[in-house]
Image (cartoon, rainbow, N blue to C red):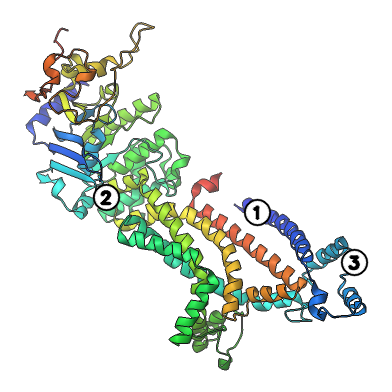
Amino acid sequence: MTETIENTRTRGHSEEPLLSVRDLTVTFTRQGEKPFVAVDGVSFDVRPGQTVGLVGESGCGKSVTSLAIMGLLPQRGVRVEGEVLYGGTNLLTQSKEQMRDRRGRDLGMIFQDPLSSLNPVVPIGVQVTEVLERHKGLSRKAATPLAREMLDKVGIPDPNRRLKDYPHQLSGGMRQRALIAMALACAPKVLIADEPTTALDVTIQAQILALLKELVEDSGTALVMITHDLGVVAGLVDRINVLYAGRIVERGDRHPLFAQPRHPYTHGLLSSIPRLDGERGTKLTPIPGSVSDNLPWANACAFAPRCSQPIDVCVEKTPEFVEDGPRALRCHNPVEVSR
Amino acid sequence: MLRFILRRLLQMVGVVVVLSLLVFLWLRSLPGGTVSAILGEKATPARRAALEKALGLDQPLYVQYWQFLKRAVQGQFGSSTGVQPGVDAMQVFVQRFPATLELSFFALLFAIAAGIPLGYMAARRRTSWFDNLSVVGSLIGVAVPVFFLAFLLKYWFAINLHWLPVSGRQDPSLDATRVTGFFVLDGLLTREYDAAWDALKHLILPSLALATIPFAVIFRITRASVLDVMDEDYVRTAESKGLTNKVIRGRHILRNALLPVVTTIGLQTGGLLVGAVLTERVFSWGGIGEAVAVAFTRRDYAVLQVCILMAAITFVVINLLVDIAYAVIDPRVRTR
């Protein structure tokens, strides 16, 4: 397994990035309210076949980032700046219709809650074939065998029957598999998975993650994995970007980052994962407080109020994002490398 | 599905029996009465008694009701005493029902054909001038009394501008052939296209007047429902698949948004039957509504009973059809 990841990474480094997010900034401007910066200068690359994780808690801007890449943010009341380069084209300057052509064909997306993300009054089969009809110009009839194949591929038993079923007739795991089938029907080069396992049972979570991993490795699809749970992505991602209050605070390849988290926030996230092999009765270590939304990065580190080891400079100066090869960090007082 | 329909039909029988008792008692609790209506206030007691006996009105109420029920299940509701004296009440109803049905059908057609597209457009252009204007317009539509609007329409378009006929269902000089009693349909069936066209022109004003309230209600429900559905996760999923606007609109938004609208349409048919009474009077339509109005002032129990019961049955049947339509659109109802 380690070998596969090493391979992917070496291959990844030699190739141009497939998706390149440059200084993405998303500001919500509601009338009569102060503009709110949800995503603040986020940059990251995704290479073909690579799996990149965007990790952070609710409100850190990870979902907004994914919607911005997909061009799914509302037209009014939102300002999107920066660049999202896909194969050299800036997706942010594409027309509405051009983006409509790309969604489902070049870029696929899987959402968090499989039940509410499926149309309750349309059979599963139609919800898969409609993507093929749209992007491959197939008729419903010609697309149906492909849809059946897709359902089979994502591990839905008896796909013939399931084509005619409605979402409420499927279990939670089956629904998420169906959503994956829809997103991958046209073999997009980039797949964005926004908390794909949050609404599922733990056992089903593992199955879905294994399935995603398998599909991505087979097809060379680049996967952007969005989650609040580092444990979920541990076995799946190649690189991790940790977001806090709209900015990336730490980045690194999976192994070094998990072994030696430098940012106190990453450190906290890792410590708050319950461990099966830990001593019984050990208390979890939560990160105190929650994300503040009051110009968090102005002349201070946004994480300082919740940090376990703040120093004076943390509330005086915004920390810079310092890159060091594959690792990058935004912190005045990083965690000591001890282990 | 079949069991569902059968169960609903049985429920319908119960509804009609209870309603028949209520209507029967209600009519007889009204001041005045058939005898006074026919003979006038100055009739001698002897003549009154004779007529009461002839009509069976001297019997105790429960006997009268039992007699009424026994004959009603055989389809006999007695003779009309006021609308068309001497004619079988059922006959009066059957003659006039197609007129009301035709009027209601066109009114509902107008209301749906305008209400759903406009409701959808208003929701998609939320808070635009179009949205605001149509919301205010629909409020006016609900607020203006039907008979008042009917008079206005008649005054402008028929009397002042002479664009459309003033009253009636068809120009009698055409001497059109009757087949079903639905004049437009008759004209098409017999290929008397001028008769069909004339009947259609007669339909426009009354059905517009009758359509305003159901239109306004359908419009508002559609708008609210589309606004709800647009925020649903599955619409975002559909967008993420890059589907065309047409598919997103029809398959993903409207198909879900129409569920409450369908229910509303069923309930609005009740309002149509009420509104028809007023509209038919203004346009001398010759339908049930007009007959009920006349029957009421002349205390024509037989005709009132037939018309009210049949209207109730129509209402229940339409709501059964609505429930079936609901099950067709929403698979979750079907499997329950």
Circle 3: element type: loop
> Hey, what amino acid is under mark 3?
Gln
**Residue pictured at 76% horizontal, 81% vertical:** B87
Pick out the residue farthest to the front: B42
Identify the subunit bearing mark 1: B
On the image, numbered disc 3 is attached to which residue?
B59
Which of the labelled discs sits on residue B8, or is there none?
Answer: 1
Side of A245 where B267 appears, left or right: right
Percent position (x, y) of residue B188? 52, 83
In the rendered image of this protein, does residue B58 appear above or below residue B135?
Answer: below
Residue count near mark 1 (Cα–Cα under 10 Å), binned few <14, some 14–19, many ≥20: some
From the viewer's perspective, is the residue at label 3 or at label 1 nearer?
A: 3
Image coords of residue B100 (percent x, y): 60, 74
Residue underneath mark 2: B242
The answer to whether marks 1 and 2 mark residues whose Cβ atoms lie closer than 8 Å is no
Q: Earlier in the sequence, mark 2 or mark 3?
A: 3
Q: Residue B167 or B335: which is nearer the viewer? A: B167
Residue A195 in percent (x, y) is at: 31, 32
